[in-house]
Image (cartoon, helix red, strand yellow):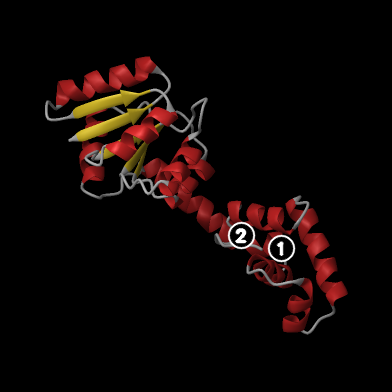
């Protein structure tokens, strides 16, 4: 199995490589410390089976790196190995196509198993992280109407779809002034300065599903 690991801490990368090779001699592990080098390597080596990605790097964070992979049409199974614990980051990684998430403290035998599963197209997410993500998703869904009223949520969804104030007013049979009043309230609740920021914050909180606002 051809494995590439990107981590800006050489000691971690070296230790991971040596530990994997000690457990499985069929593994071929190539380590890199810079995001640009990793992008170039992945672009020129289509035989990579699994790419291990750290989320916190000085030159390009993991989320930006996955966006860069997508823009370059690099389709390699990604296994996140990180010391971070933010569920919002993990949710974003999975939305961008990551196949697995592991804490850096994961025992090497579990890392070996995860690499094998990911290379076969299986998802690998520890129960603690999966349960946290499920709980956060349910919490957002259950509390949507306590954060925004039904009418406010209705208007916000239309803003997300790209409708102008006059279009929203026409659809809901209310005045444009009323639409503006609702939007001002929504901005205040979500601490947003404009329509785009408002929608982005609502998406990040799970109030809205990802979409395009114009």
**Depicted 150 relative to depicted 93: above or below:** below
Q: Which of these two is toward me, 110 or 198? A: 198
**Residue reaching furthest to the top:** 11
The residue at the point 74 percent across, 76 percent down is 168
Residue underneath mark 2: 207
| Percent coordinates x, y for residue 6 in the rendering | 37, 28
Nearest the viewer among 63 and 84 is 63
Asked if the residue at tag 1 contacts the one at tag 2, i.e. Cβ–Cβ closer than 8 Å, the answer is yes
Q: Residues within 10 Å of mark 1 (few under 14, many from 20)?
A: some
Label ID, residue 36: none
Residue under the point 22% across and 29% down: 109
Above or below — where is 129 with respect to 193? above
Depth check: give the residue in front, 149 or 160: 160
Residue 206 image point, x, y percent: 58, 56
Q: List x then y, in percent, for residue 190.
A: 73, 53
Secondary element at image label 1: loop
Indicate the position of residue 110 as horizontal and vertical percent values.
Answer: 25, 33
* Disc 2 to disc 1, C-alpha distance: 9 Å
Label drawn at residue 148: 1
Report the side of 212 relative to 100 (left or right). right
Left or right, 116 with reference to 94:
left
Q: Which of the marked residues, 2 or 1, is nearer the chain's N terminus?
A: 1
Q: How many residues crowd mark 2 within 10 Å: few (<14), some (14–19), many (20+)?
A: many
Q: Quadrant of the N terminus?
A: top left
């Amino acid at each position: 199995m051809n494995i590439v690991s990107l981590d800006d801490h050489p000691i971690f990368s070296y230790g991971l490589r040596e530990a994997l090779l000690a457990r499985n001699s069929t593994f071929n592990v190539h380590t890199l410390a810079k995001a640009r080098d990793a992008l170039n390597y992945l672009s020129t080596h289509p035989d990579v089976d699994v790419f291990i990605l750290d989320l916190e790097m000085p030159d390009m964070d993991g989320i930006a790196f996955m966006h860069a992979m997508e823009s370059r049409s690099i389709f390699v199974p990604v296994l996140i190995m990180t010391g971070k614990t933010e569920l919002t980051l993990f949710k974003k990684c999975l939305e961008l196509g990551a196949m697995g998430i592991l804490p850096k403290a994961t025992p090497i035998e579990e890392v070996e198993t995860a690499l094998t599963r990911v290379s076969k197209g299986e998802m690998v997410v520890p129960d603690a992280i999966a349960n946290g993500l499920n709980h956060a998703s349910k919490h957002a869904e259950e509390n949507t109407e306590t954060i925004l009223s039904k009418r406010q949520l209705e208007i916000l969804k239309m803003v997300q779809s790209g409708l102008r104030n006059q279009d929203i007013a026409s659809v809901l049979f209310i005045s444009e002034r009323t639409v503006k009043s609702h939007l001002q309230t929504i901005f205040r609740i979500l601490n947003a300065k404009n329509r785009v920021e408002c929608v982005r914050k609502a998406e990040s909180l799970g109030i809205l599903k990802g979409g395009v606002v114009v």
